[in-house]
Amino acid sequence: MSRLTNNLMKSGYLRTISIIEAFANIDRIEFVPSDMELDANADVPLPIGYGQTISQPTTVAIMFELLDPREGQKILDIGSGSGWTTALLAYVVGDKGKVIALERIKELCDFGRKNLRKIKKIDKGVVEIYNIEGSRGYAVRAPYDRILVSASAPEVYQELKDQLKIGGKMVMPVYNHLHYVEKRGENDFYEERYPGFMFVPLISRK
């Protein structure tokens, strides 16, 4: 197990066994540019080009613990970037699950696909990556058990909430807050927010 994973566990950010195993088995170094490899296990966001970053591991751990991904689920990963969160989710859902990843920047979408092909510990059939802008989600594959958004929006978009299954959960940044959304009924949403985060903006809605 990496020092990074151990530190996240000791600090209390990683608590769930399946998420811990994903962090332990999916090495962040595979998802950063070659000139960033020496810093891959630092607990900081790192640039991946095109004005985007791979998120700070602590932030990803917090988001995953809120999201509560589980084996066999179908998960929408919006703003997949270099593919790290997609790979972590794919490890958790296993070969009976599905991760639909959306990335608007073609070069990063291609980079993410290349990185995911390197990871032998996840079933490649579990992941689908699409080069599309993700603020409206991906309704053609809805509903989803979970939705993870890794870029900041000005609000929690109703279209994303509508794409959750009843009982589904979503975690997304709104400005400098993390928002947790749980769909308890067709039009019944429970929401909480957690302040103190920084994300690149979700480029969007035209």
Image (tube, helix red, strand yellow):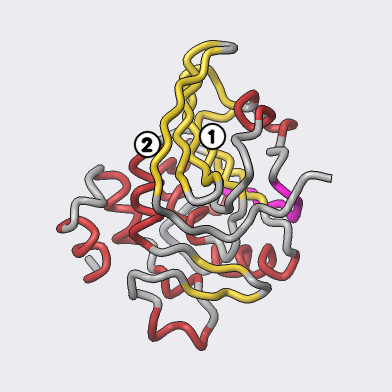
Q: Nearer the viewer, residue 71 or 6?
A: 6
58 horizontally vs 190: left or right: left
Residue type at numbered disc 2: Asp
Q: What residue is shown at x 61% (from left), y 44% (from top)?
A: 100
The furthest residue to the left:
10
The residue indicated by pointer 1 is: 74
Please state the horizontal and vertical placement of residue 35, each as a whole percent of the image: 51, 88
Magenta region, residue range:
127-134
Q: What residue is shown at x 55% (from left), y 61% (from top)?
A: 83
Residue type at numbered disc 1: Lys
Query: Counting residues from the N terminus, which is met first, the one under dot 2 or under dot 1?
Result: 2
Please state the horizontal and vertical placement of residue 68, each as a whole percent of the image: 37, 36
The residue indicated by pointer 2 is: 68
> Do labels 2 and 1 touch, CB within 8 Å?
no
Q: Is residue 112 above or below residue 37?
A: above
Q: Distance of mark 2 from mark 1, alpha carbons?
A: 12 Å
Q: What residue is shown at x 58% (from left), y 53% (from top)?
A: 151
Element type where label 1 sits in the image: strand
Please state the horizontal and vertical placement of residue 60, each as a whole percent of the image: 40, 54
How crowded is the residue under tag 1: few (<14 C-alpha within 10 Å), some, or many (20+)? many
